[in-house]
């Protein structure tokens, strides 16, 4: 069976810990490879490699580093199909969906190519006689990224291009469930001219993560994953004095007002609820139907579900692939079993599609109506193809449903009323807001991040805030007295900015 190892010092390395775990093919339900799980000693070797590479890489001109990013961009684009196939094979998402995640990742590489514009600092001329003040930003050193299974190419691309273009050395600990895309990215970075040690990949589980969090030479940790782990990563990383941004799970609400375009709203709910089998942190998982829109909206959504082709990740006609593991599929299906007891009506049951009884980890698109606010289907992140509909009478009640969620990643409103949309945009407790847009993932020149249990830390990921996260500021006050200037002499008073 294929063995998937690490990437250290610019080359593949087999693991030496003696620990590994299976990598499943979610479409067939069979193990297709084994991934090595790094020990603390192997993590230390990766950090040592990054420490050794950092001085020379960070001393290169910014132009030299961004030229490498331009080459990487071309290589990534040229190898897009192969990378998408790799993602599909281990994750199970369809080829088109995998291609979409690479396209969004490419946007982040584009952004890193233009980083010079953001890193140019600022200058305050002649703040006093012969004195100028300027600011610059410098890389942190060795930084680490810990990423989830659901975007094995895109989330590493949220982090690595900006981090290394800023001059850092990077250690990626990808999800152990779909580890191969990270190795392909590392190899493409090598081909683009990234020196050995600047990007290392350690495969692993909790043991590797704990070592990265405690390692004294790791300056910062970017994490994306579920909320409980994000909370732990933030608490542990910061207790070791590190800078941490930890993005957690989500429960994204889509509020549909009675005046909304019903067809637009139903299409959006289906696309955003079931794309990637609901395994997206920006998936819509709860539709909040206000007033009279409830019955026609549920009917319009339900009508669309039988048309969704559930099938293999690589099959041409397939629109929705399997879930990541059998255990996860069973957990998601458990919400359908529980719903009636909690007052919900299962309108469409994904356990009934033919693929759901096969060996692959499939579950069909499912719809639960009349989900009670506060019930498990409403509160928990289900992370599967289960869309809940909560019915309310007023806009205010809808806002209370959204506001009581422990998560605050994204939220959307569907309406024709600009005034209400504006009010929603200002009031809603979420970091990313859509107006007649169901998955408001910010473009690469903005930054990505939620509120409440969806983000621990203050800086959002990628874009301008990503640059801030991966650099620290320095402000220089310099005096160059003019050649015939009079020396100021000793002055014990606190310096002021007037020349007197
Ligand atoms: P996960 O939390 O299980 O794993 C994420 C990473 O943490 C993996 O690399 C994993 O190896 C590591 N990890 C797991 N358990 C750990 C432990 N006990 N100690 C230390 N490290 C541990 O998440 P997942 O199942 O891979 O991904 C799905 C989750 O990620 C969902 O909750 C989803 O909402 C979230 N997600 C959030 C965003 C966002 O931007 N907010 C984006 C994508 C995914």
Image (spheres, rainbow, N blue to C red):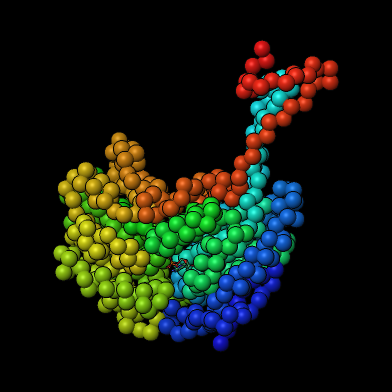
Tell me which residue sits at (24%, 64%) in the image.
376
Image quarter for residue 382? bottom left
Could you tell me how many numbered marks the image carries?
0
- Residue 422 in percent (x, y) is at 33, 38
Q: Is residue 91 above or below residue 470?
A: below
User: Which residue ends up furthest to the right in the rendered image?
Assistant: 483
The answer to whether any part of residue 168 appears in the image is: yes
- Residue 309 in percent (x, y) is at 37, 72
Q: Is residue 486 above or below residue 12?
A: above
Ligand 1 lies in which image quarter? bottom left
Q: Is residue 100 above or below residue 333?
A: above
- Residue 413 in percent (x, y) is at 31, 47
Quarter placement of the C terminus: top right
Tell me which residue sits at (21%, 49%) in the image.
290
- Residue 105 in percent (x, y) is at 55, 58
Tell me which residue sits at (60%, 69%) in the image.
43
Quarter placement of the N terminus: bottom right
User: Which residue ends up furthest to the top in the rendered image?
Assistant: 500
The answer to whether any part of residue 281 appears in the image is: no
> Relative to residue 330, is residue 55 drawn left or right?
right
> Relative to residue 164, is residue 300 drawn left or right?
left
Tell me which residue sits at (47%, 59%) in the image.
236
């Amino acid at each position: 069976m294929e063995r998937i190892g690490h990437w250290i010092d610019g080359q593949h390395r087999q693991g030496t810990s003696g620990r590994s775990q299976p990598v499943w093919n979610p479409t067939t339900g069979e193990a297709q490879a084994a991934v090595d799980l790094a020990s603390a000693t192997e993590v230390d070797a990766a950090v040592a490699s990054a420490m050794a590479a950092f001085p020379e890489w960070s001393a290169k001109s910014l132009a030299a580093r961004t030229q490498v990013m331009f080459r990487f961009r071309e290589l990534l684009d040229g190898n897009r199909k192969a990378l998408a196939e790799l993602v599909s094979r281990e994750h199970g998402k369809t080829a088109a969906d995998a291609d979409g995640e690479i396209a969004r990742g490419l946007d982040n590489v584009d952004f890193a190519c233009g980083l010079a514009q953001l890193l140019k600092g600022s200058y305050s001329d002649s703040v006093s006689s012969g004195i100028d003040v300027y600011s610059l930003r410098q890389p942190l050193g060795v930084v680490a990224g810990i990423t989830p299974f659901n975007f094995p190419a895109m989330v590493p691309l949220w982090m690595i291009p900006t981090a290394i273009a800023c001059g850092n050395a990077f250690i990626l600990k990808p999800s152990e469930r779909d580890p191969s895309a990270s190795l392909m990215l590392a190899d493409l970075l090598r081909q683009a001219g990234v020196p050995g040690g600047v990007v290392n990949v350690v495969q692993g589980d909790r043991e590797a993560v704990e070592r990265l969090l405690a390692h004294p030479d790791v300056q910062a940790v970017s994490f994306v994953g579920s909320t409980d782990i994000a909370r732990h990563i933030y608490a542990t990383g910061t207790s070791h004095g590190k800078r941490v941004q930890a993005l957690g799970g989500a429960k994204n609400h889509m509020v549909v007002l009675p005046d909304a375009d019903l067809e637009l709203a139903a299409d959006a709910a289906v696309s955003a609820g079931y794309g990637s089998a609901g395994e997206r942190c920006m998936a819509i998982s709860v539709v909040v139907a206000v007033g009279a829109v409830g019955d026609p909206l549920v009917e319009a959504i339900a009508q669309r579900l039988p048309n969704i082709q559930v099938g293999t990740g690589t099959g041409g006609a397939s629109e929705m692939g399997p879930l990541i593991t059998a255990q996860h599929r069973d957990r998601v299906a458990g919400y359908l079993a529980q719903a009636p007891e909690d007052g919900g009506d299962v309108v469409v049951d994904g356990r009934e599609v033919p693929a759901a009884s096969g060996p692959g980890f499939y579950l069909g698109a499912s719809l639960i109506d009349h989900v009670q606010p506060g019930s498990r289907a409403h509160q928990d992140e289900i992370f599967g193809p289960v869309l809940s509909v909560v019915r309310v009478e007023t806009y205010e009640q809808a806002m209370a449903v959204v506001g009581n969620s422990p998560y605050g990643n994204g939220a959307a409103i569907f309406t024709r009323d600009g005034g209400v949309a504006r009010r929603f945009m200002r009031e809603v407790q979420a970091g990313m807001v859509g107006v007649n847009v169901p998955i408001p993932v910010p473009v690469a020149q903005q930054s990505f991040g939620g509120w409440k249990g969806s983000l621990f830390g203050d800086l959002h990921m990628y874009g301008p805030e990503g640059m801030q996260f991966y650099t620290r500021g320095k402000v220089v006050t310099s005096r160059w007295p003019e050649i015939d200037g009079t020396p100021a002499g000793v002055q014990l008073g606190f310096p002021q900015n007037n020349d007197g």
